[in-house]
Amino acid sequence: MSAHNGPDPLGHWIDGKAVDDVTGRTGEVFDPATGRVARKVALADQAMVDRAVASASEAAASWRSSTLSQRSKVLFNFRELVAAHLDDLAGLVSAEHGKVLDDARGEVQRGLEVVEFACGIPQLLKGGFSEDVSTGVDVYDVRQPLGVVAGITPFNFPAMVPMWMYPIAIACGNAFVLKPSERDPSVSRRAAELLAEAGLPDGVFTVLNGDRDAVDGLLAHPDVAAVSFVGSTPIARHVYATGTAHGKRVQALGGAKNHMVVLPDADLDGAADAAVSAGYGSAGERCMAISVVVAVGDVGDRLVPAITDRIGRLTIGPGDQPGSDMGPLVTGAHRDRVASYVDAGEAEGAEVVVDGRGFAPPDGDPDGFWFGPTLLDHVTPEMTVYADEIFGPVLSVVRVDALDDALDLVNANPYGNGTAVFTGDGAAARRFQHDVEVGMVGINVPIPVPMAYYSFGGWKDSLFGDTHVHGQEGVHFYTRTKAVTARWPERSISPLAAGTGSQAGSGGSVDLQFPTSQ
Ligand code: NAD
């Protein structure tokens, strides 16, 4: 499947225009369902980074003074355009990522919810005002934009993750430079075209295609004030350390190992459905995918057969093929890496209940990056298949005796992105959500992605920096507060209005005391 009909290699979007970049390095973008190269993408060098940031800096200088109603109008127009082009955008996502179309539509829809949130920017930017903090003195605060902010995003949600960032950054009055994943860059070009059509001034939104050179160029650039990053933990750590060393504000969201704890009193069918949809949806290439089922007590004996039965009913095929539940993995290299984890798990003693290695759909292209749903039972915390983020359709079952053991297991894990508990016992659920050291918790909900008006982010090695994305924390990340203390002495009132007025220079004592409200 090839959904793009644009330039090859795909260039950048700078100053409100497509910018070809045919002289430099390029990356290959695959059609994961056939394994063939679908297009190439330009990989920016330092000169292109400088050009993109210069354009964004110029645009930021005037966009910061745009009115709130101008900004919300552009975002509202954009909301309408994305909704009208939802299927095209989902098609671009599916063609380069491999996920099935319904899933791709869902991702665009979740991104759209952030745009809708950002349309409320006049309300979101309201500050506080305190009248008469001292005689004739008022204090208020305003939130002002930072200038140029950059977003660096992963392959797995090429539409949604950038939309966690740019609608809010732009609504707050910043110019935004997006460096999307080089594996599925086409949907970001389309978003740029739609933002321009929505009336966004040139330069306020830039797409800089590239790889680590572009990222490092942005991280060191003196005119980039802040960086939002979403991707794997080692790169998140690097982005946070480098960005903050260059004086930038950084939020860097990393990888995950999400546990779903199932207690013996859980609705077994509901829990099995949830494990399958959260484990194998999008071929496990979701930062909120469940990769470990923690079976408490004897529930594993019933849950493993229930999950196995459901796996047998999944259809694996090209993302655009009606009826496909799960598509291929993003690249051949990634598919091989996922397979190596299953090999290691088997060698370390895990029981391979369902084996997806070597799978190819009967009517699919054998050269596609296929990997079937895989279920491993009796996994233990020492195994690499448990320790590392695999990011594929591999579900590991770890068996423990009691809720306390499950909590200890989850809390000992270095990641802390998402988790879920399945139980019919409210007190057990409450204890879990209270004691678990994870940023996003589901109670009988397998993928607890917060709505746009809450904030998304993990704890521990799943987030470097302390601000989560979107919601009010997103507004805070993309603005800085200025507190103003104001006094307008009576003498400033014109004689006509006040009747009398004291004269400047008429004397009075000089006071060096620290100001208090007394
Ligand atoms: P990745 O870390 O390989 O790439 C992310 C971004 O970093 C890309 O834009 C890429 O070009 C850039 N990059 C890659 N290597 C780099 C380097 N050495 N130096 C500088 N920049 C570099 O991640 P990915 O494979 O695209 O995405 C999957 C990962 O993202 C998984 O670990 C997943 O858990 C994580 N993820 C996390 C969240 C979250 O909210 N926490 C959401 C989505 C994805």
Image (spheres, rainbow, N blue to C red):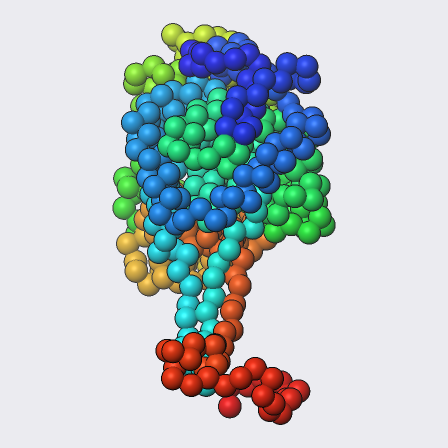
Give percent across and percent down for residue 209: 58, 26
Quadrant assignment, res 90: top left
Quadrant assignment, res 434: bottom left
Tell me what residue is drawn at x 37 percent, y 78 percent.
497
Above or below 64: residue 333: above
Tell me what residue is drawn at x 37 percent, y 40 percent.
75
- Compare residues 453 and 218 and report the one nearer the observer: 218
Give percent across and percent down for residue 97: 47, 23
Outermost residue, front direction?
Answer: 496
- Compare residues 36 and 91 and report the one nearer the observer: 91
Q: Is residue 206 left or right of residue 126?
A: right
Tell me what residue is drawn at x 50 percent, y 32 percent.
202
- Compare residues 107 and 180 and report the one nearer the observer: 180
Above or below 367: residue 391: below
Question: Would you say residue 256 is visible in this rendering?
Answer: no
Q: In which quadrant of the rendered image does the N terminus lie?
A: top left
